[in-house]
Image (tube, helix red, strand yellow):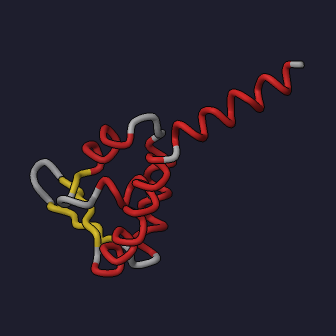
C-alpha cells in the first residue's frame, strides 16, 4: 500500500522511494517492487545513464488500485483516536 501511495504523483527512483517509505530494508523494498511489477501495478524503467537510473511508475491498473486505497487510508487516519483509546484500554487490562 505504501509503495502505491508513494507513486501517486510521479515516477520515483529507488532511492526516492526508500526515503519516502522510511524504515524498510533495500531487499524488502526490492522484493515488494518486483511483486508489484509482476502483478502489473507498476512499471520499472532503466535509464542506462551514466549513471544508471531505475524508476518506478504506476500503470493504469496501479492507478485503479490507488483510487481504492486512498479512501481506506483516509478512513484509517480518521479512526486513529479511537484506535489509540482501544489500545490503551487493552494494554491497561493486560497489565492488570
Q: Residue at x 44, y 43 (%)?
A: 26
Q: Quadrant of residue 88?
A: top right
Q: Relative to 40, is 48 on the left or the right?
A: left
Q: Is residue 46 left or right of residue 33?
A: left
- Residue drawn at x 45%, y 75% as measured from the top left: 38
View extreme (right): residue: 96
Quadrant of the image for the C terminus? top right
Could you tell me residue 86's position as x and y percent?
68, 37
**Residue 45 percent coordinates (x, y):** 22, 67
Name the residue nearer the viewer: 19 or 64: 64
Q: Is residue 52 above or below residue 71?
A: above
Residue extending farthest to the left is: 50
Q: Is residue 83 left or right of residue 58?
A: right
Vertical placement of residue 81 versus 75, above or below: above
Quarter of the picture holding the N terminus? bottom left
Q: Quadrant of residue 60?
A: bottom left
Q: Position of residue 62 (x, y in %)?
A: 35, 73
Residue visible at 15% across and 60% down in the picture: 48
Q: Residue at x 39, y 78 (%)?
A: 40
The number of discs equals 0
Amino acid at each position: 500500500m505504501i509503495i502505491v501511495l508513494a507513486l501517486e504523483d510521479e515516477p520515483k527512483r529507488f532511492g526516492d522511494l526508500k526515503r519516502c517509505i522510511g524504515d524498510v530494508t533495500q531487499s524488502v523494498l526490492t522484493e515488494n517492487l518486483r511483486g508489484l511489477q509482476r502483478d502489473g501495478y507498476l512499471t520499472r524503467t532503466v535509464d542506462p545513464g551514466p549513471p544508471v537510473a531505475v524508476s518506478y511508475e504506476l500503470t493504469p491498473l496501479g492507478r485503479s488500485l490507488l483510487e481504492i486505497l486512498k479512501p481506506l487510508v483516509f478512513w484509517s487516519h480518521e479512526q486513529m483516536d479511537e484506535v489509540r483509546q482501544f489500545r490503551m484500554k487493552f494494554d491497561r487490562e493486560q497489565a492488570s
